[in-house]
Image (spheres, grey):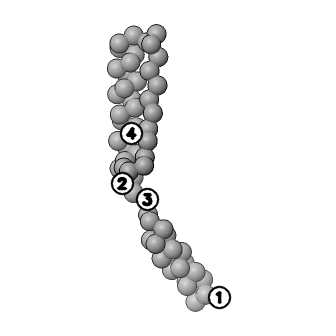
Amino acid sequence: MWQGMKSVMVFDPKDSQVETDRKWREWMEHKSSVGDKYVPTAAETRKYLNKLENRKQRYA
């Protein structure tokens, strides 16, 4: 799942250690929440769209 995915965090050398730590914690929270979301594969998406199309044909 993580192959090919990249994330970047920019540190400003002028930031204090407290500010750097805050940015780091915020980045880690957002990074982990993105990893928790499921994205369907192309095959699953095609299957879902075919089901929708079949329903439309039945009721037309």
Residue position marked by numbered label 3 in the rendering: 39
**In the structure shown, which secondary structural element does the residue marked by tag 4 occupy?**
helix
**In the structure shown, which secondary structural element does the residue marked by tag 2 occupy?**
loop
Q: CA distance from mark 3 to mark 2?
A: 10 Å
Q: CA distance from mark 3 to mark 4?
A: 15 Å
Label 3 Cα crowd, 10 Å radius (few <14 / some 14-19 / many 20+):
few
**Front of the two marks 4 and 1:** 4
Residue position marked by numbered label 2 in the rendering: 1
**Looking at the image, can residue 48 be seen?**
no
**Front of the two marks 3 and 1:** 3
Residue position marked by numbered label 1 in the rendering: 60
The one nearer the camera, 27 or 1, is 1
Q: Amino acid at mark 1?
A: Ala
Query: Which quarter of the picture shows residue 31?
Result: top left
Q: Earlier in the sequence, mark 3 or mark 2?
A: 2
Label 2 Cα crowd, 10 Å radius (few <14 / some 14-19 / many 20+):
few
Q: Where does residue 37 sit, x and y in percent of width and height?
A: 39, 52
Q: Earlier in the sequence, mark 3 or mark 4?
A: 4
**Looking at the image, can residue 54 be seen?**
yes
Label 1 Cα crowd, 10 Å radius (few <14 / some 14-19 / many 20+):
few
Q: Earlier in the sequence, mark 3 or mark 1?
A: 3
Q: Earlier in the sequence, mark 4 or mark 1?
A: 4
Residue position marked by numbered label 4 in the rendering: 31
Q: CA distance from mark 4 to mark 1?
A: 45 Å
Residue lying farthest to the front in this orientation: 4
Q: Earlier in the sequence, mark 1 or mark 2?
A: 2
Q: Where does residue 2 sit, x and y in percent of width and height?
A: 36, 49
